[in-house]
Image (tube, rainbow, N blue to C red):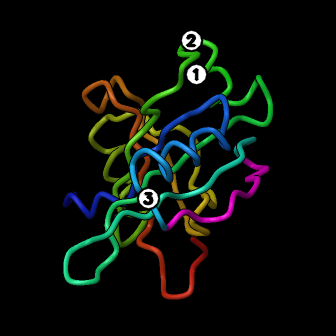
């Protein structure tokens, strides 16, 4: 397994619109995607794009508001009502190879690969196996992928 690019940091929020205003008005973000609902994860989501070096894309902040209290993000917010860092996400070239490698190492992979907010395959690894951080593994988006 080789560590790939840090794609984004997932931030859970009880109010997506207030969080967008915070990143725009306080943090000076000027590139924020339009919010959309990701039904499979029961969240309303958008991405704050940070600038990279030499015109490249930087790491994104993924803002997540649950659409249902019983969603994974909804349950997390019930324990952390102010919101905050929910997960980190690293890219890999092949999601299926990465999943098999994590399983071979005895890591608790949470579910099968599925389509995430970027329109590419993802899975999560349990925080107890990742230094206390819920970790999303995503296949590197192909040219033209969403978000």
Foreground: disc 3 or disc 2: 3
> Left or right of 93: which side holds 19?
right
The picture places residue 55, in percent across and down from the top left corner, at: 28, 83
Do the numbered discs 2 and 1 sit on residues whose CB atoms are within 8 Å?
Answer: yes
For the residues labelled 1 and 3, the Cα–Cα distance comes to 26 Å
Residue drawn at x 40%, y 70% is 94
For the residues labelled 2 and 1, the Cα–Cα distance comes to 5 Å
Q: Which residue is mark 1?
A: 76
Residue bounds of the magenta highlight: 31-40
For the residues labelled 3 and 2, the Cα–Cα distance comes to 28 Å
Is residue 132 magenta-colored? no
Residue situated furthest top in the rendering: 79
Picture layout, residue 41 above or below residue 100: above
Residue drawn at x 52%, y 56% is 122
Front residue of 34 and 113:
34
Which mark, residue 79? 2
Q: Which residue is mark 3?
A: 29
Q: Quadrant of residue 132?
A: top left
Neighbor class of circle 2 (other Cα within 10 Å; few <14, some 14-19, many 20+) is few
Mark 1 secondary-structure assignment: helix
Mark 2 secondary-structure assignment: helix
Picture layout, residue 111 above or below residue 140: above
Q: Quadrant of residue 76?
A: top right
Quarter of the image that includes the N terminus: bottom left
């Amino acid at each position: 397994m080789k560590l790939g690019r840090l794609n984004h940091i997932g931030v859970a929020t009880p109010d997506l619109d207030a969080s967008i205003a915070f990143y725009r008005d306080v943090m000076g973000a000027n590139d924020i995607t339009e919010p959309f609902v990701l039904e499979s994860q029961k969240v309303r989501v958008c991405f704050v794009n940070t600038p990279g070096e030499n015109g490249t894309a930087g790491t994104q902040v993924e803002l997540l508001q649950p659409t249902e209290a019983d969603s994974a993000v909804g349950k997390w917010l019930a324990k952390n009502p102010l919101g905050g860092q929910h997960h980190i996400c690293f890219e890999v070239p092949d999601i299926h190879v990465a999943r098999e490698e994590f399983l071979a190492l005895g890591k608790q992979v949470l579910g099968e690969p599925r389509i995430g907010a970027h329109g590419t395959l993802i899975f999560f690894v349990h925080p107890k196996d990742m230094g206390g951080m819920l970790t999303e593994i995503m296949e590197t988006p192909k040219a033209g992928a969403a978000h």
